[in-house]
């Protein structure tokens, strides 16, 4: 392959990274309950040594929640902060920068999940509207999503994110990325099919954008310019999707306001047929080219592309000026040395272990996690 632009340094917020090859957030379900551990450190360091300019952590819960992913890590208590600090310090020593992706699942949590029971609070969402689909394999009977409780005061959740941003700084991260994609809480506020509030947090595109905009401002109070957001306007995962014009109007307004904030970047997840669920015989998403559609709204904010981007596409994106970097996901799972392979023209020939993609019974099991082979150099 030939993609020289990928291997040039880039300013990201207040930091400079060695190249434009990013590692996307990838849920892997390997923490010890909710605390980051040694096998996670090994995993991230492998990829830092493997040439990732910017690593975005797996989604980190800002508070105790019963997610569909058991053993998802958090950042609300000191043991978690300490665990992340060990990982971030090791990633830095290996030459990469690392952002924490902050996450709240909203309506796709489950009241019977052990962590939700420990939390002692309802599953909160913008409105009391259940998502379709879902399967909680670790709960008896493998139930699907349930009807959530409408969060009475969204500012309470904003404060949780702000505290998580403070904790991420204590852990030594280089910045924070708000998880605004894939049908989780931020998507739920933006999407009119999941947000049917009649107060200032719902209704118009302006009102539905209020929660993520205020949340980003709160995070900037902690981090300044080292704040980013990931969004997936075309995605149908977790029962998301509005008509095309409403999608463009909503995200167009949201991104116009985001562009005034001086964020480090906006990461776009492109449409993926693989992640588009079918309900009543129809695909759920609103497929469209998110880079072409929304880059005009971001005149001052760098864009990263994610989801199925080929190295050749990455070079064309960067050469066009529409994108400054590309984040890969699945390729990083199977190729811990992905950055080196891309630079030195090695084949991407490791086979992804789907059986162990999200772990096995042992939380510290490295099978399908840290056991992928590197190329010969």
Image (cartoon, rainbow, N blue to C red):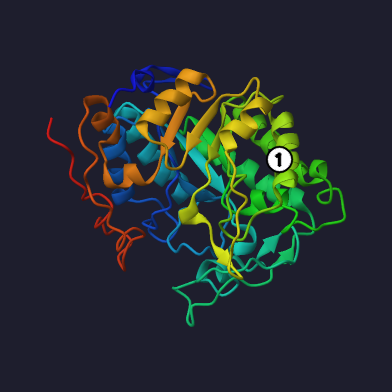
Which residue appears farthest toward the bottom when viewing the image?
141
Q: Is residue 132 left or right of residue 100?
A: right
User: Element at badge 1?
Assistant: helix
- 212 relative position to 135: left or right: right
Q: Residue at x 84, y 46 (%)?
A: 204
Q: Quadrant of the N terminus?
A: top left
Find residue 167 and report its horizontal and vertical position in percent: 54, 41
Count up the numbered dots: 1
Whether 246 is drawn above or below 16: the answer is below
Which residue bears the numbered disc 1? 248
- Looking at the image, which is closer to me, 213 or 63? 213
Residue 160 relative to residue 10: left or right? right
| Image spot of residue 268 (x, y percent) | 55, 37
The one nearer the camera, 96 or 307, is: 307
Q: Residue furthest left?
A: 376
- Quarter of the image for residue 124 reads bottom right
Residue 119: where, in percent of width, then height? 59, 65
Q: Is residue 354 left or right of residue 67?
A: left
Q: Nearer the viewer, residue 126 or 353?
A: 353
Tell me which corner region of the image, top left, top right, bottom left or bottom right, holds residue 299. top right
In the rendered view of the protein, which quadrant contains the C terminus? top left
How many residues crowd mark 1 within 10 Å: few (<14), some (14–19), many (20+)? some
Image coordinates for residue 356, horizontal then vertical, percent: 30, 61
The reply to whether residue 48 is in sight is yes
Residue 15, visible in the rendered structure: no
Q: Is residue 23 above or below residue 198?
A: above
Q: Is the residue 326 above or below the residue 350 in the image?
A: above
| Residue at the image position 54 percent from the left and 62 percent from the top | 277
Figure quadrant of residue 362: bottom left
Who's the residue at 48% across and 76% down the image? 139
Q: Nearer the viewer, residue 246 or 89?
A: 246
């Amino acid at each position: 392959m030939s993609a020289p632009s990928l291997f040039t340094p880039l300013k990201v917020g207040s930091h400079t990274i060695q190249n434009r090859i990013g590692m996307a957030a990838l849920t892997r379900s390997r923490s010890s309950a909710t605390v980051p551990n040694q096998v996670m450190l090994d995993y991230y360091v492998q990829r830092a040594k493997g040439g990732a300019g910017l690593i975005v952590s797996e989604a980190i819960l800002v508070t105790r929640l019963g997610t569909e992913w058991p053993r998802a890590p958090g950042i609300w208590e000191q043991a978690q902060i300490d665990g992340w600090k060990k990982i971030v310090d090791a990633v830095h020593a290996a030459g990469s920068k690392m952002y924490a992706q902050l996450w709240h699942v909203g309506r796709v949590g489950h009241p019977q999940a052990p962590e939700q029971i420990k939390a002692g609070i309802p599953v909160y969402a913008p409105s009391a509207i259940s998502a379709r689909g879902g399967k909680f394999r670790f709960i008896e009977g493998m139930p699907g999503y349930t009807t959530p409780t409408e969060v009475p005061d969204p500012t309470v959740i904003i404060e949780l994110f702000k505290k998580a941003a403070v904790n991420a700084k204590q852990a030594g991260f280089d910045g924070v990325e708000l998880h605004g994609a894939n049908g989780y809480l931020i998507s739920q506020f933006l999407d009119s099919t999941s947000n049917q509030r009649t107060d200032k947090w719902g209704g118009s595109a302006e009102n539905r954008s209020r929660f993520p905009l205020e949340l980003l401002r709160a995070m900037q109070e902690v981090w300044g310019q080292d704040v980013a957001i990931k969004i997936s306007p075309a995605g149908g995962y977790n029962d998301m999707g509005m008509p095309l014009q409403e999608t463009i109007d909503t995200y167009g307004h949201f991104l116009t306001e985001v562009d005034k904030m001086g964020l480090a970047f906006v990461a776009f997840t492109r449409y993926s047929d693989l992640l588009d669920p079918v309900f009543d015989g129809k695909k759920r998403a609103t497929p469209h080219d998110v880079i072409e559609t929304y880059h005009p709204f971001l005149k001052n904010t760098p864009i990263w592309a994610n989801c199925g981007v080929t190295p050749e596409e990455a070079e064309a994106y960067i050469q066009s000026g529409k994108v400054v970097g590309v984040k890969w996901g699945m390729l990083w799972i199977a190729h811990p040395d992905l950055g080196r392979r891309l630079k030195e023209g090695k084949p991407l020939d490791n086979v992804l272990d789907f059986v162990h993609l999200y772990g096995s019974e042992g939380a510290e099991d490295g099978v399908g996690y840290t056991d992928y082979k590197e190329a010969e150099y």
